[in-house]
Amino acid sequence: EQTVFYAKCLANDVPVAIEILADIIQNSSLAEPEIERERGVILREMQDVESNLQEVVFDHLHATAFQGTPLGQTILGPTKNIKKISKSDLLQYIKTHYQPARIVLSGAGGVEHKKLVDLANKHLGSLKNTALDIPDLAPCRYTGSEIRVRDDSMPLAHVAVAVEGAGWTDADNIPLMVANTLVGAWDRSQGGGANNASYLARAASCENLAHSFQSFNTCYKDTGLWGIYFVSEPLQIDDMMYNIQKEWMKLCTSVTEGEVERAKNILKTNMLLQLDGTTP
């Protein structure tokens, strides 16, 4: 939902970093050879994405769950758009979206707030708001639906099932994160499934229901997707789905305080590990 330009540098080099970031936003040359080079890079990235079945599944999941809304579109877009986008399109996009009312400058680590404000005034102070009003973005509509892409030549099935989740500003997001941790993840290559704390991991391992699975909680501003992605033999899909529904009902009816505390501790640990460094 955002475009981000960021830099990591030594504390003494913060002024240079801010100057470079401001220059990127305001003075990109957009020379034709550079546009053509980046066009080729994006087309190659699209080929990589299309060969990654997990990426393909999640693109289809978003396309059907948020059909008719911006979240239903892929990040890279269709190939025809990449091939025909021009310098004038890019300039119009920058003019429309790179405005002070839409920009946030933040810093972490060895930088003082006042110094950051002074640098912002120096390098970004000339930016003007040309748009009369900030667009009012309506919440993205969730549509319960299904999409299947069948290929009998493939040995494994890649499946994602999800329900509407909470946005990252919603108070329910934290409970959903705990529930996501309760369901957990498992991969056959890791072993130890029979002794896993997750019921679904034990079932998938002992009954040979899947090669791997992972629960996910994808958040956007006003909505999200909460669900599970798994890889299994085609003939095991129904049994795996039955156990997934059983696990979800267990969260509603019979999860214990001990299991919740364990999930909360795991979640806290993972969140603290992600805070290693200044980027988060």
Image (spheres, rainbow, N blue to C red):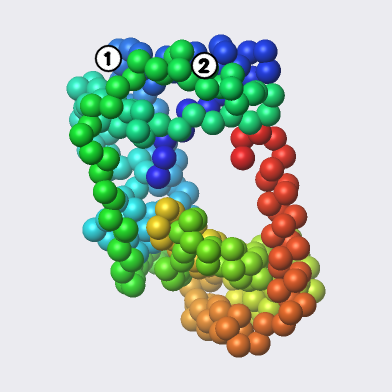
Q: Residue at x 60, y 88 (%)?
A: 253
Q: Can residue 158 be seen in this snapshot?
A: no
Tell which of 257 and 211 is nearer to you. Answer: 257
Label 1 secondary element: helix
Picture quarter containing residue 260? bottom right
Q: Residue at x 48, y 73 (%)?
A: 234
Label 2 secondary element: helix
Q: What residue type is disc 1 on?
A: Glu
Judged by depth in the image, the label closer to the viewer, 1 or 2, is 2
Q: Position of residue 69 (x, y in %)?
A: 27, 56
C-alpha gap between disc 1 and disc 2: 31 Å
Q: What residue type is disc 2 on?
A: Leu
61 lies above or below 84? below
The residue labelled by disc 2 is: 119
217 lies above or below 52? below
Q: Position of residue 169 (x, y in %)?
A: 48, 56
Picture quarter containing residue 230? bottom right
Picture quarter containing residue 110? top right
Left or right, 148 with respect to 86, comes to right
The residue labelled by disc 1 is: 32
Q: Position of residue 119 (x, y in %)?
A: 52, 16
Tell which of 32 and 166 is nearer to you. Answer: 166
- Residue farthest along the bottom direction in this orientation: 253
Tell which of 263 and 39 is nearer to you. Answer: 263
64 lies above or below 128? below
Q: How many marks?
A: 2
Quadrant into which the C terminus falls? top right
Q: Residue at x 48, y 61 (%)?
A: 170
Q: Position of residue 212 (x, y in %)?
A: 61, 64
Dot 2, how many residues are within 10 Å of its Cα: few (below 14), some (14-19), or many (20+)? some
